[in-house]
Amino acid sequence: RRLAVAIGITARFVVRHDLAEEEAVQVIKYIVSLFPCGAVAPSSVERADGSKRPVVCGQNQLFHQGLHRSDVLVRTVDAGWLQHISEWLQGGVTYAWPGEFTCSECVAQASNQAVLTASLLEQVEEYKVEKCLEGLAPKVGTPWVLKAHSSFSSSGLKVVQDTA
Protein backbone atom coordinates (compact mmCIF):
# COMPACT_ATOMS: atom_id res chain seq x y z
CA ARG A 1 0.00 0.00 0.00
CA ARG A 2 2.81 2.43 0.87
CA LEU A 3 4.46 1.68 -2.43
CA ALA A 4 1.24 2.52 -4.30
CA VAL A 5 1.08 5.83 -2.47
CA ALA A 6 4.73 6.53 -3.33
CA ILE A 7 4.05 5.73 -7.00
CA GLY A 8 1.02 8.04 -6.98
CA ILE A 9 2.98 10.91 -5.43
CA THR A 10 5.83 10.33 -7.87
CA ALA A 11 3.42 10.31 -10.83
CA ARG A 12 2.02 13.66 -9.78
CA PHE A 13 5.56 15.00 -9.41
CA VAL A 14 6.45 13.74 -12.91
CA VAL A 15 3.38 15.38 -14.45
CA ARG A 16 3.63 18.66 -12.56
CA HIS A 17 7.30 19.05 -13.47
CA ASP A 18 6.74 17.78 -17.01
CA LEU A 19 9.52 15.18 -16.78
CA ALA A 20 10.40 13.05 -19.79
CA GLU A 21 9.91 9.27 -19.61
CA GLU A 22 13.66 8.73 -19.21
CA GLU A 23 13.66 11.03 -16.18
CA ALA A 24 10.70 9.16 -14.71
CA VAL A 25 12.67 5.91 -15.09
CA GLN A 26 15.57 7.55 -13.22
CA VAL A 27 13.18 8.46 -10.40
CA ILE A 28 12.11 4.79 -10.15
CA LYS A 29 15.78 3.70 -10.09
CA TYR A 30 16.32 6.10 -7.20
CA ILE A 31 13.28 4.78 -5.30
CA VAL A 32 14.49 1.18 -5.75
CA SER A 33 17.94 2.21 -4.49
CA LEU A 34 16.32 3.24 -1.20
CA PHE A 35 15.07 -0.31 -0.51
CA PRO A 36 16.83 -1.95 2.46
CA CYS A 37 19.35 -4.77 2.38
CA GLY A 38 18.27 -7.91 4.21
CA ALA A 39 21.51 -9.84 4.61
CA VAL A 40 21.86 -11.59 7.96
CA ALA A 41 25.06 -11.23 10.02
CA PRO A 42 27.12 -14.29 10.92
CA SER A 43 26.44 -16.01 14.25
CA SER A 44 29.63 -14.52 15.75
CA VAL A 45 27.62 -11.42 16.73
CA GLU A 46 24.31 -10.96 18.55
CA ARG A 47 22.13 -7.99 19.37
CA ALA A 48 23.44 -5.90 22.25
CA ASP A 49 19.92 -5.58 23.69
CA GLY A 50 19.79 -9.35 24.28
CA SER A 51 17.03 -9.96 21.73
CA LYS A 52 17.23 -13.25 19.88
CA ARG A 53 16.15 -11.73 16.56
CA PRO A 54 18.77 -11.93 13.81
CA VAL A 55 21.14 -9.06 13.12
CA VAL A 56 20.51 -7.77 9.61
CA CYS A 57 22.15 -5.21 7.38
CA GLY A 58 20.43 -1.85 7.66
CA GLN A 59 21.89 -0.12 4.61
CA ASN A 60 19.94 0.76 1.51
CA GLN A 61 21.19 -0.09 -1.97
CA LEU A 62 22.20 3.51 -2.66
CA PHE A 63 24.95 3.44 -0.02
CA HIS A 64 25.75 -0.28 -0.05
CA GLN A 65 29.24 -0.86 -1.44
CA GLY A 66 30.33 -4.43 -0.79
CA LEU A 67 30.11 -4.17 2.99
CA HIS A 68 27.08 -4.92 5.16
CA ARG A 69 26.53 -2.90 8.34
CA SER A 70 24.32 -3.97 11.23
CA ASP A 71 21.13 -1.99 11.75
CA VAL A 72 21.41 -2.33 15.54
CA LEU A 73 24.19 -2.30 18.10
CA VAL A 74 25.74 -5.73 18.55
CA ARG A 75 28.22 -7.55 20.72
CA THR A 76 30.68 -10.25 19.81
CA VAL A 77 29.62 -13.69 21.04
CA ASP A 78 33.06 -15.11 21.87
CA ALA A 79 34.89 -11.89 22.73
CA GLY A 80 38.03 -11.76 24.81
CA TRP A 81 37.78 -9.97 28.15
CA LEU A 82 39.26 -6.68 26.85
CA GLN A 83 36.97 -6.59 23.83
CA HIS A 84 34.00 -7.60 25.99
CA ILE A 85 34.64 -4.72 28.42
CA SER A 86 35.09 -2.27 25.56
CA GLU A 87 31.81 -3.33 23.92
CA TRP A 88 30.03 -3.25 27.29
CA LEU A 89 31.26 0.29 28.04
CA GLN A 90 30.10 1.45 24.61
CA GLY A 91 26.71 -0.25 24.97
CA GLY A 92 27.42 -2.31 21.86
CA VAL A 93 29.11 -1.68 18.55
CA THR A 94 28.07 -1.61 14.94
CA TYR A 95 29.24 -4.58 12.97
CA ALA A 96 30.36 -4.73 9.35
CA TRP A 97 30.88 -7.81 7.21
CA PRO A 98 31.70 -8.28 3.52
CA GLY A 99 28.99 -9.00 1.00
CA GLU A 100 26.91 -7.58 -1.80
CA PHE A 101 23.43 -6.08 -1.54
CA THR A 102 20.64 -8.59 -0.89
CA CYS A 103 17.16 -7.15 -1.13
CA SER A 104 15.20 -7.55 2.08
CA GLU A 105 12.42 -10.18 1.95
CA CYS A 106 9.85 -7.62 3.07
CA VAL A 107 10.29 -5.60 -0.14
CA ALA A 108 11.68 -8.20 -2.55
CA GLN A 109 8.41 -8.60 -4.44
CA ALA A 110 8.07 -4.84 -4.84
CA SER A 111 11.64 -4.26 -6.05
CA ASN A 112 11.02 -5.25 -9.67
CA GLN A 113 12.08 -2.08 -11.50
CA ALA A 114 10.20 -2.94 -14.71
CA VAL A 115 6.92 -3.42 -12.83
CA LEU A 116 7.43 -0.22 -10.86
CA THR A 117 8.25 1.74 -14.03
CA ALA A 118 5.16 0.41 -15.80
CA SER A 119 3.04 1.27 -12.78
CA LEU A 120 4.49 4.78 -12.62
CA LEU A 121 3.99 5.43 -16.34
CA GLU A 122 0.39 4.19 -16.09
CA GLN A 123 -0.23 6.51 -13.15
CA VAL A 124 1.38 9.38 -15.08
CA GLU A 125 -0.96 8.83 -18.03
CA GLU A 126 -3.97 8.63 -15.71
CA TYR A 127 -2.95 11.83 -13.99
CA LYS A 128 -2.52 13.52 -17.38
CA VAL A 129 -6.08 12.52 -18.25
CA GLU A 130 -7.27 13.83 -14.92
CA LYS A 131 -5.52 17.14 -15.55
CA CYS A 132 -6.93 17.29 -19.07
CA LEU A 133 -10.44 16.64 -17.84
CA GLU A 134 -10.00 19.38 -15.25
CA GLY A 135 -8.96 21.73 -18.03
CA LEU A 136 -5.41 22.10 -16.73
CA ALA A 137 -3.69 20.57 -19.75
CA PRO A 138 -4.49 21.05 -23.44
CA LYS A 139 -3.64 17.51 -24.64
CA VAL A 140 -3.29 13.98 -23.40
CA GLY A 141 -2.32 10.59 -24.84
CA THR A 142 -4.91 8.99 -27.13
CA PRO A 143 -5.19 5.58 -25.36
CA TRP A 144 -6.17 7.25 -22.11
CA VAL A 145 -8.72 9.53 -23.73
CA LEU A 146 -10.37 6.44 -25.20
CA LYS A 147 -10.23 4.71 -21.83
CA ALA A 148 -11.78 7.76 -20.15
CA HIS A 149 -14.45 7.95 -22.87
CA SER A 150 -15.34 4.28 -22.44
CA SER A 151 -15.47 4.75 -18.67
CA PHE A 152 -17.88 7.68 -19.06
CA SER A 153 -19.92 5.73 -21.59
CA SER A 154 -20.27 2.73 -19.28
CA SER A 155 -21.41 4.97 -16.42
CA GLY A 156 -24.77 5.55 -18.09
CA LEU A 157 -24.16 9.24 -18.69
CA LYS A 158 -24.72 10.59 -22.18
CA VAL A 159 -21.37 11.58 -23.69
CA VAL A 160 -21.54 14.16 -26.49
CA GLN A 161 -18.92 16.12 -28.35
CA ASP A 162 -18.63 19.77 -27.42
CA THR A 163 -19.18 21.77 -30.62
CA ALA A 164 -18.36 25.14 -29.08
Image (tube, rainbow, N blue to C red):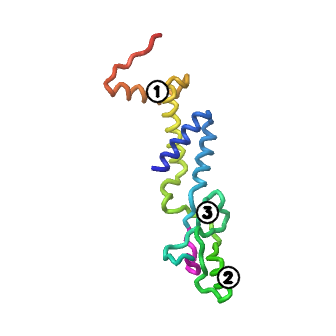
Task: Report the mark closest to the observer, 1 or 2.
Answer: 2
The image's mark for residue 145 is: 1
Residue 138 position by quadrant: top right
- Label 3 sits on what residue type? Gln
Circle 2 residues within 10 Å: few <14, some 14–19, many ≥20:
some
Circle 1 residues within 10 Å: few <14, some 14–19, many ≥20:
some
Separation (CA) of disc 2 from disc 3: 25 Å
Instruction: Specify start and end residues of the magenta stretch as a single range.
Output: 39-47
- Label 1 sits on what residue type? Val
Q: Nearer the viewer, residue 75 or 121?
A: 75
Circle 3 residues within 10 Å: few <14, some 14–19, many ≥20:
many
Ranked by sequence position, the earlier of labels 2 and 3 is: 3
Q: Is residue 145 above or below residue 113?
A: above
Residue highlighted by disc 2: 86
Q: Which secondary structure lies at badge 3? A: loop
Q: Which secondary structure lies at badge 1? A: helix
